[in-house]
Amino acid sequence: MLLSHESPLLLPTELDSIHNYYEGMVFEALQQQLPEQFGNNEYIADIACVALNHLPPRYIRHDVDMAFYLSPNERQEMLEKVNQAVTKAIQFVNDSQQEYE
């Protein structure tokens, strides 16, 4: 019996290649905005989750695919959205941590 999320046509290795294109962009923005905190995995992961939840999903299999489909203007818009989402997420996580201290 197959569950609704199981497919006989896709192998696990094929599914492993699917990811949200914004993930890499968010981690790059975090590394630029918080280089001194980048080793603090829990803090960075919390911020990344908040930022990603404020961005539309862009699921792809290969990053190179996006290079062919994005115009320079679209890429710039995405970068601006990512930087705004990361900035807001940093503030949100910092404010939340202060509430619990």
Image (cartoon, rainbow, N blue to C red):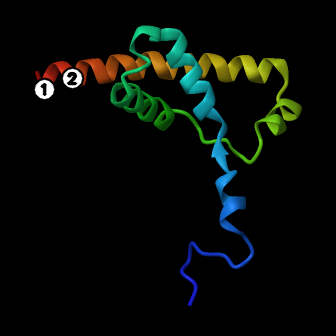
Q: Residue at x 58, y 85 (%)?
A: 2
Of residues 65 and 78, which is closer to you in this image? 65
x, y percentage for residue 80?
62, 16
Residue 79's image quarter? top right
Quadrant containing the N terminus in the rendered view: bottom right
Q: Residues within 10 Å of mark 1 (few under 14, many from 20)?
A: few
The answer to whether 62 is drawn above or below residue 89 in the figure is: below
Q: Quadrant of residue 58?
A: top right
Which amino acid does the dot numbered 1 rest on? Tyr
- Which label number is shown at residue 54? none
List x then y, in percent, for residue 23.
58, 34
Q: Based on the displayed image, in which of its 4 quarters is residue 66 positioned?
A: top right
Residue behind mark 2: 97
In the image, farthest residue toward the right? 68
From the viewer's perspective, tell me whether residue 74 is left or right of residue 71: left
Q: Residue at x 10, y 21 (%)?
A: 101
Residue labelled with disc 1: 100
Residue lying farthest to the front in this orientation: 39
